[in-house]
Amino acid sequence: MTTTSPAAVPTDVAPAAVAGVAPGVAPLTRYVAEFVVGTQEKDIPAEVQQLAKKAILDALGVALPGAISAPGKVLTGYLQDLGCAGPATVIGTPHRLAPRFAALANGTAMHADDYDDTLQAETGRYQGVHPTAPVLSAVLAAGEARGASGRDLLLAYQVGVEVACRLFDATHVNHILHGFHATATCGMLGAAAAVARLYGMDADAVATTLGIAASQAGGLQENFGTSVKPFHAGRSAEVGIVAADLQGRGFTASPIILEAKRGFFQALGGGHEAARLLGKLGQPWSFVDRGIWLKAFPTGSLGHPAMTKMLELVRQHDIHPGDVARIRVKTSQNIHHTLLHHQPKNELQAKFSLEFCLAALLLERKCGLNQFHDEYVMRPDVQDTIAKVEYATYSPEEATRERHTIVTSHVEIEMKDGQRHGGRVDAGKGNKANPMSEDEVADKFRECAEFSHWPMGKAERAIALVRRLEDVADIREITRELTAAGD
């Protein structure tokens, strides 16, 4: 089977030559499959490799508190009760499970605190996708079972993240507007692509693996703010392994699952924009295109610009809670719709409440893992401060006129003496425009380890190993540092 470079569009399948595809429709599944097979380490710029290692360290760190979160503990306990023992590590625990189930547990843990990375949608579109949690969880579990090298894991991870991000870009906006969660759909196909690459499949096998995975893609936004949202990332990782394993045992699936009239894009979004995918994989890589956003706060990233501005104002003007009359915030209608818990009563709702996050920043000058628990959310002073937040939205016309980004936010703090402090912000901390440094990501890993009561010696060794991931001969060197005593 002929392979292509990441830049190439396949020419061996004519757009109108395949049953089930309308005349003139591009062979998208084949293009993705050829990218998965053909991409080599030399095709990935050094900057992209460095950003990938930073994202991997970030995700492994957030898995530690995720493992002891309510969803993490429930799911791991359930899998233990099923007797799913195997060779793959459940991060932050002494448990080892079959790869598919370790991927399920780890993907859920990485997304449990909403502290994992995000690719924001392009301006004029909606929401984003969390690519690393499903992709990394899948290749880590599958790779650990095979004794894969750090270099192998890094390449498979890069391929899977790129596929997830570009499929998200190509999907019709109705995919989001009708309620699907892209991490559970595009993230699932990214995980499948990554495992297929790790397994060394040819393009036919990759296409089949994508076909198997696509029939399982789902996940509904209505479950944001509940245990199900992080479960979406875990299921995506699990399906990535299941799809690849079933293909290896002879399972069949449509080889045109993306572009087919009854395929992924049409069924889950009512269509797609081929120009957002064809010729885009690795050209440039998503890590350096819009950039993949590492989170400074463990909450939905759409609120991070407003949070960044709020913290800046509080520190700059030394604002104390008792002196504040009200807080005004204005975002897009989409952000208001996504951060849907405007009067949160528990931790999970608070993660999707911009009002809570702004209140915490005023009260504590931080909004981290220690603020997201039910007791803190229901503290009287927190609830009183939430009540001071006035949340308004701007119209799409205003956004166009004022050249807003997808996350442009306005924050104003009105003091009891009549003074007002505020401003506009177009990107939050961690965005490409305001990135987290390698040292800041390492510190975030340490924060997660400390919160989880993880041995700091193990944490430091994990940081050092990921920083030289391409030189690690066996990724079990890394998972050993993420396994609790008692194994």
Image (cartoon, rainbow, N blue to C red):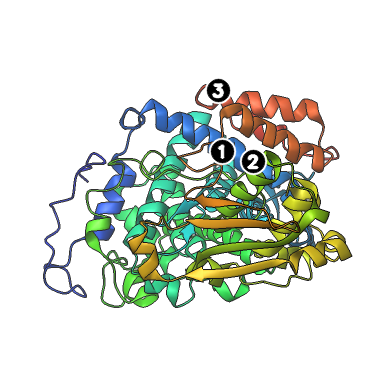
Label whose residue precedes the other's in the sequence (3 or 2): 2
Looking at the picture, tell me which residue is in the foreground, 396 or 154. Answer: 396
Looking at the rendered structure, which numbered label has been put on residue 56?
Answer: 1
Is 19 situated left or right of 416 in this image?
A: left
- The tag on residue 169 is none
Check disc 2: other Cα within 10 Å, few if <14, some if 14-19, many if 20+. Answer: many
Whether residue 359 is visible to the viewer of this picture, yes or no, is yes
Residue 182 lies, in percent from the top left, at: 47, 63
Whole-angstrom CA distance, mark 2 to mark 1, is: 6 Å
User: Is 68 situated left or right of 334 in this image?
Assistant: right
Q: Quadrant of residue 101?
A: bottom right
Point out residue 81 in the picture as x, y percentages from the top left corner.
79, 63
Amino acid under label 2?
A: Leu
SS at mark 3 in the image: loop
Mark 1–mark 3 Cα distance, whole angstroms, equals 12 Å
Q: Amino acid at mark 1?
A: Ile
What is the crowding at mark 3: few (fewer than 14 residues within 10 Å), some, or many (at least 20)? few
- Compared with residue 415, is residue 144 higher up or lower down, i.e. above or below? above
Q: Are marks 3 and 2 in contact (CB under 8 Å)?
A: no
**Residue at (54%, 64%) from the top-left corner?**
330
Name the residue rendered at 22%, 48% in the picture.
Answer: 279
Left or right: residue 126 compared with residue 19 = right
479 over 356 or under it: above or below: above
SS assignment at label 1: helix
Labelled pair 2, 1 in contact (Cβ < 8 Å): yes
Q: Which residue is mark 3?
A: 468
Q: Position of residue 384 (x, y in %)?
A: 81, 66
Position of 463 with respect to 173 (left or right) is right
Q: Which residue is identified by label 2?
A: 60
> Quarter-wise, where is residue 122 in the image?
bottom left
State the image coordinates of residue 426 (x, y, percent, origin top left): 47, 50
